[in-house]
Image (cartoon, grey):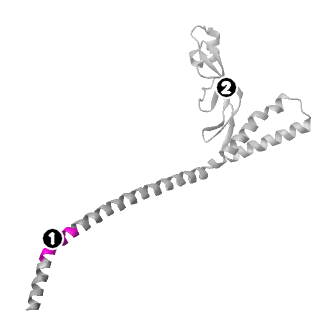
Amino acid sequence: MNSLSEKGAEETDKELSVPETLEKLLKLEQKNSRQLVQSLRENVNFQNQVRQGMQKELEEFKEQQRGEQFTPILRTIAAVCVEYRKILADEELPKHLGRTLQFMFDELEDILTDYDAEVFTSAVGEARRPLLTKIINTVATGDKNLHNTVACSRRPGVMRNGRPLYREFVDVYVFDASIKVKKSEAVRTE
């Protein structure tokens, strides 16, 4: 009979422990759900960080492929070419020194050309390119057609892929209604 009472006690324990077991399982499931949600959030954050890092590296590699890492050096070369080339025209130099300097500036321009940079000068009457030019002086004009066009290029500029390495200095026409244009001047500008 002992074995019978033991079986009954076990069944009673089992019956009493089923709700407790269910409650424990429910708590475990809730805990697992919270941990899963937390893990998913952390995973999403990690994926976003990885994507951002990869995007940044991709942009850096694209810049390198376009040769953007050379831009600071090319800016310096452009400045030397533009600023100091005028020495050749401004000063009386011995012939051999003038030729040597001319070769040096030609070599520097070749370096710029090798990296798709070009030295440019705007023509008189050409529309001013705001990104590539800097206005040094304005010249009043009575001709509306000349407004915001180049009156004079003071110093050449250097650009690469449509972006300035060294801006051109220009004087620009500005329309002034108080100035009367003579018919002979209007005919010449057209």
Question: Marks 1 and 2, Cα distance to the nearest angstrom?
Answer: 89 Å
Q: Residues within 10 Å of mark 2 (few under 14, many from 20)?
A: many
Above-or-below relation of 82 to 170: below
Depth check: give the residue in front, 45 or 135.
Answer: 45
Residue type at mark 2: give it: Val
Please give the residue where the numbered disc 2 appears in the rendered image.
170
Residue at 58% across, 19% down: 147
Depth check: give the residue in front, 77 or 142.
Answer: 77
Query: What secondary structure prevails in the magenta region?
Result: helix
Q: Element type at marker 1? A: helix
Residue 118 placement: quadrant: top right
Depth check: give the residue in front, 106 or 155.
Answer: 155
Magenta residues, start to end: 15-25
**Image-based side of 185 in relation to 23, left or right:** right
Residue at 60% across, 53% down: 65
Magenta-drawn stretch contains 17: yes
Q: What percent of the width, then of the height, locates residue 112?
A: 71, 44
Q: Residues within 10 Å of mark 1 (few under 14, many from 20)?
A: few
Depth check: give the residue in front, 147 or 186.
Answer: 147
Q: Nearer the viewer, mark 1 or mark 2?
A: 1
Please give the residue where the numbered disc 1 appears in the rendered image.
19
Image quadrant in which the C terminus is located: top right
Q: What percent of the width, then of the height, locates residue 47?
A: 43, 58
Question: Of marks 1 and 2, which one's residue comes earlier in the chain?
Answer: 1
Magenta-drawn stretch contains 94: no
Q: Which mark is residue 100?
A: none
**Image-based side of 186 in relation to 40, left or right:** right
Residue type at mark 1: give it: Pro
